[in-house]
């Protein structure tokens, strides 16, 4: 499903964010990506989101070399992804319903389809009763659940999460992890970047530890 | 259709949220198009005036006092055969004097005091409508008549018409330069307002890019926002020109028409309004595209 072959990412003046990285994540896996700040976790996610391309090596997802994709193919590829960020990236001027429905709306889905999918995922994350609330009226945990709902609304095959529990307390973090485990149980591949080793231990899934752009530990 | 609905909703919402900055852009476009419209109106009327006066242009062939009837006949034939004349009227010395008395009643007594009639007989040639445009033929005729026996002088109203056409061209050129500069300023203002709107919507745009929204969905609302601003600016300009037209008609319309010899002046024809509206929308579209092209 996801494969990095000798991937390096060089940022000016010889600073490597990733160096000769090789990894493989199978379809339906739940994998943590961990390591200290600056280890290269976010860079790897940027490459997977095709916001950037490797300086060397190949990043293959679903059999496609991401660096070789055209603009339209990048759009099509991204429609198969869901993403969750530490700062939620919710649109403050829109309600919960509008935030989640935003994705199918800008993808040009029919209104009935937008509504059906939005209600489904809101129900699934248990926040259908807050659909008319604005993000600022929600707790951190609720906001992240909305972000997960938004990531799921397009029925992605891969969920990428960058420090999804970075702004949450331990109990809420576990709650979010349980939600992502449920997503994974439905067959979606989940890749989570986090530096929270305690959380990884409690969830107990495969983890790849990065340091200075290299994988230093697999557990 | 869904895409269009989305564009309109987003563009209108964005305009409303940034209404202060958008108002500035709309007024700038409005000012530019007002000047454009004003120059178009002036140009249209000057052209009409030039055409009208050109059509009524006439020759006056002043005859020597000793001209013979055969020479007059020969001159008349020459004018008729040239194909540019609609009518030739022979005016005798007495008729010329009478015409002077009618046109200048205050000076009539002065003419009475003269021992002899100083006014020459003439052939007044009315040019055919449109024939005045056959400049070379008319000029050639004037040249031939001037050298003909029995002719004292030929007056042909061509030079001042050429001067009027020169003024029309000058007004048009100056107008185009000013309008071009204003159009550029308007497009840049729209671009800046749309850029501000894009900045305000940067989170939305980022999410749209991340979820793989088609570029048309990302850029469409930005372009449409520019088009809407341009259209609104054009409406402002048309309204201002309409108000100016109404004011001029009410105050000086009759006087202007009388002085210029035109029954009715053209103030704001539908075609001009259409040009302004389309021009405004095009300017806005250019401004929107300048920003949208940068969003990938």
Image (cartoon, grey):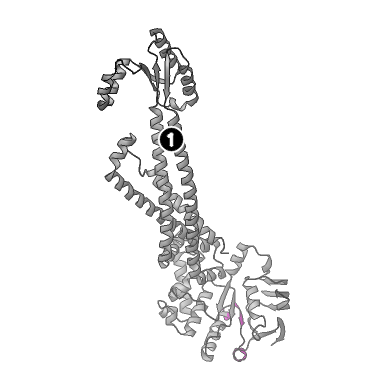
In the picture, which quadrant includes the C terminus of chain A? bottom right
| Residue B240 in view | yes
B104, above or below B182, in the image: above
Task: Report which quarter residue B57 is drawn in.
Answer: top left
Task: Report which quarter residue A37 is drawn in.
Answer: bottom right
| Residue A21 in view | no
| Chain identifier of the residue bearing label 1 in the image | B
Q: Residues within 10 Å of mark 1 (few under 14, many from 20)?
A: some
User: Is residue B269 located in the magenta-colored stretch of the structure?
Assistant: no
B290, above or below A88, in the image: above
Residue at 66% x, 64% y is A69
State the SS at label 1. Answer: helix
Residue at 65% x, 73% y is A47
Measured from the top left, where is residue B258 in percent x and y? Answer: 30, 36
Q: Nearer the viewer, residue A54 or B259?
A: B259
A38, above or below A47, in the image: below
Q: Is residue A47 left or right of residue A89?
A: right
* Start-end of magenta stretch: A184-204
Where is mark 1, residue-wise? Answer: B164
Q: Nearer the viewer, residue B263 or A30?
A: B263
Measured from the top left, where is residue A31 in percent x and y? Answer: 64, 82
User: Is residue A185 located in the magenta-colored stretch of the structure?
Assistant: yes
Task: Report which quarter residue A65 is drawn in.
Answer: bottom right
Residue at 48% x, 23% y is B139
Measured from the top left, where is residue B209 in percent x and y? Answer: 56, 68
């Amino acid at each position: 499903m996801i494969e990095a072959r000798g991937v390096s990412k060089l940022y000016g003046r010889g600073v490597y964010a990733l160096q000769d990285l090789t990894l493989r994540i199978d379809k339906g896996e739940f994998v943590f990506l961990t390591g200290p700040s600056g280890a290269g976790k976010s860079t790897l996610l940027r490459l997977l989101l095709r916001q950037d391309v490797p300086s060397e090596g190949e990043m293959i997802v679903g059999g496609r070399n991401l660096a070789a994709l055209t603009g339209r193919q990048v759009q099509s590829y991204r429609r198969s992804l869901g993403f969750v960020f530490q700062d939620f990236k919710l649109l403050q001027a829109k309600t919960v319903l509008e935030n989640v429905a935003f994705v199918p709306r800008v993808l040009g889905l029919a209104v009935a389809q937008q509504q059906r999918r939005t209600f489904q995922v809101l129900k699934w994350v248990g926040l259908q009763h807050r659909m008319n609330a604005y993000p600022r009226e929600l707790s951190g945990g609720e906001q992240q659940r909305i972000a997960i709902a938004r990531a799921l609304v397009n029925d992605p095959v891969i969920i990428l999460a960058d420090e999804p529990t970075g702004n949450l307390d331990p109990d809420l973090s576990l709650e979010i992890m349980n939600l992502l485990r449920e997503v994974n149980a439905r067959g979606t591949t989940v890749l989570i970047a986090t530096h929270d080793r305690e959380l990884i231990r409690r969830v107990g899934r495969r983890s790849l530890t990065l340091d200075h752009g290299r994988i230093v530990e697999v557990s | 259709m869904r895409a269009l609905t989305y564009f309109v909703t987003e563009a209108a919402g964005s305009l409303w949220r940034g209404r202060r900055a958008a108002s500035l852009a709309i007024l700038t476009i409005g000012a530019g198009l007002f000047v454009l419209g004003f120059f178009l109106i002036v140009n249209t009327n000057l052209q009409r005036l030039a055409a009208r006066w050109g059509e009524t242009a006439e020759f006056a062939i002043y005859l020597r006092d000793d001209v013979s009837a055969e020479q007059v006949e020969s001159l008349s034939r020459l004018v008729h055969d040239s194909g540019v004349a609609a009518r030739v009227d022979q005016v005798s010395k007495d008729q010329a004097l009478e015409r002077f008395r009618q046109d200048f009643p205050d000076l009539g007594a002065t003419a009475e005091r003269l021992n002899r009639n100083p006014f020459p007989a003439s052939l007044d040639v009315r040019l055919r409508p449109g024939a005045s445009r056959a400049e070379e033929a008319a000029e050639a005729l004037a040249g031939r008549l001037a050298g003909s026996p029995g002719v004292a002088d030929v007056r042909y109203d061509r030079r001042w018409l050429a001067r009027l056409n020169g003024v029309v061209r000058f007004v048009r050129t100056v107008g185009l330069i000013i309008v071009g500069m204003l159009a550029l300023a308007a497009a840049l203002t729209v671009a800046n307002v749309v850029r501000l709107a894009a900045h305000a919507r940067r989170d939305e745009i980022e999410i749209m890019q991340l979820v793989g929204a088609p570029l048309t969905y990302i850029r469409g609302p930005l372009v449409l926002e520019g088009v809407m601003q341009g259209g609104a600016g054009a409406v402002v300009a048309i309204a201002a020109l309409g108000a100016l037209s109404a004011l001029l008609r009410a105050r000086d319309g009759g006087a202007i028409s009388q002085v210029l010899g035109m029954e009715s002046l053209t103030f704001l024809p539908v075609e001009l309004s259409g040009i302004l509206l389309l021009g405004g929308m095009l300017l806005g579209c250019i401004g929107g595209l300048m920003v949208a092209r940068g969003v990938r």
